[in-house]
Amino acid sequence: MCIAVPAEIIEIKENNVAVVDFGNLKQEIRIDLIDAVVGEFVLVHVGFAIQKIDRDEALETRELFKQCYEAIGEEAFPA
């Protein structure tokens, strides 16, 4: 099974690199596979944005991940 995690693009750099925010974690990813702009939400899988996603759906999915981690006693997106 593969899991993609929603993140918001907060900066786009040269060479198809973007900085995204997963909640409390910011990370660089590749955006070679999609056309995206700052402020959009994308699904990230193994360091690549693979699809744009609606903001409401992204935030709902992020909340579900958080609830799953809380149920097992871990922090979903450590600071």
Image: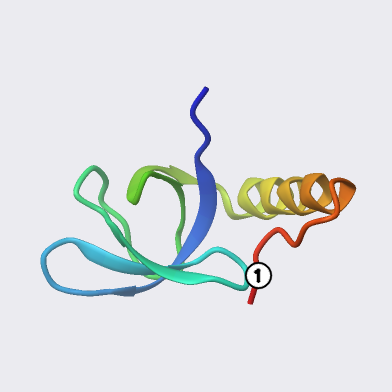
From this viewpoint, which residue is outermost toward the left? 15
Tell me residue 68's x, y (percent). Answer: 80, 44
> Disc count in the image?
1
Quarter in which the C terminus is drawn: bottom right
- Element assignment for label 1: loop
Residue 17 placement: quadrant = bottom left
In the rendered structure, the answer to whether residue 25 lies left or right of residue 61 reads left
Residue 39 placement: quadrant = bottom left
Tell me residue 4's x, y (percent). Answer: 50, 40
Q: In this orientation, which residue lies closer to the viewer: 79 or 14?
A: 79
Residue 11 in the image: above or below residue 31: below
The three-letter amino acid code for the residue at tag 1 is Pro
Tell me residue 3's x, y (percent). Answer: 53, 35
Residue 52 in the image: above or below residue 30: above
Residue tagged 1: 78
Badge 1: residue crowd in 10 Å (few <14, some 14–19, many ≥20) = few
Which residue: 51% across, 58% down? 7
Which residue: 85% across, 54% down? 73
In the rendered structure, the answer to whether residue 56 lies left or right of residue 72 reads left
Which residue: 83% across, 50% down? 67
From this viewpoint, which residue is outermost toward the top? 1
Identify the coloring.
rainbow
Which residue: 61% across, 50% down? 58
